[in-house]
Amino acid sequence: MSHQRVLVYGGKGALGSALVQSFKSRGYWVLSVGDNEKADAFVSVPKECSTIQDQEKHVLSEVARKLPEGGKLVGILCVAGGWAGGNASKDTMVASADLMMRQSVWPALIAARLAALHLAPTGLLQFTGAAAAVSGTPGMIGYGLAKAAVHQLTASLAGTKSGLPSGATVIALLPATLDTPMNRKWMPKADVSGWTSLSWISDLLHSFVSNPESRPESGTLIKLETANGETTTVFSKI
């Protein structure tokens, strides 16, 4: 399966690292945007790329350079992101919103550009939204704003004349809380049976990448609901 190639955008984070490991173990060639030496190749995003235009130019150039000539990607998995709270009374609210846009919306937009250039016909483009962002998020305005933008981008790219390759599928996963080392560190008393495991998400995305017939319709938002250690999916659209 060495001809099968995937790109993980955000391959340095907890979920991204899990995806890199999962697809590597299944014989895929994996390119990470984000430093990850376990990937077959990775692209660093230097701090000097302080605007989205700079990041786009750098990432597109480096991905084109590191992909085998003429090589196409069967999957682009965008799991970059972060979290910040704050309501309108906080003097940090606007700064937090700016950070959330940089961490969630910028990578999603650049991943969309990568898909237009390098995704194979019938390939998968996956974004990471948030279950909370399907409604108001008054205590974390910037986070909800950024994730809702990712949901809207998913819907737009699923439309005709979006610029994606013919036959491609675009979806967004909407988790609540992921079972990551950092979440366990900062919430040591939480009930982790309601957190979604990274291996479960890795298996789900592998099934979508490897078997196009298993995917929901393009533009679908996939809410992940976990209780008592079991995860189910709820499909919706904007």
Image (spheres, rainbow, N blue to C red):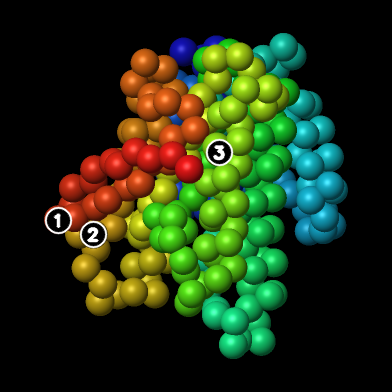
Residue at screen point 28% across, 41% down: 233
Q: CA separation, marks 3 and 2?
A: 26 Å
Q: Residues within 10 Å of mark 2 (few under 14, many from 20)?
A: some
Q: Horizontally, is 213 left or right of 42 in the view?
A: left
Q: Position of residue 218 (x, y in %)?
A: 48, 27
Q: Foreground mark, 1 or 3?
A: 3
Q: CA separation, marks 1 and 3?
A: 30 Å
Residue with the mark numbered 3: 154
Q: Position of residue 40 (x, y in %)?
A: 59, 30
Q: Position of residue 44 (x, y in %)?
A: 71, 46
Q: Considering only vertical position in the picture, is 66 above or below 97?
A: above
Q: Nearer the viewer, residue 135 or 52?
A: 135
Q: Earlier in the sequence, mark 1 or mark 2?
A: 2
Q: Mark 1 touching mark 2, by CB under 8 A?
A: yes
The disc at residue 228 is 1
Residue with the mark numbered 2: 194
| The quarter of the displayed image where residue 114 is located | top right
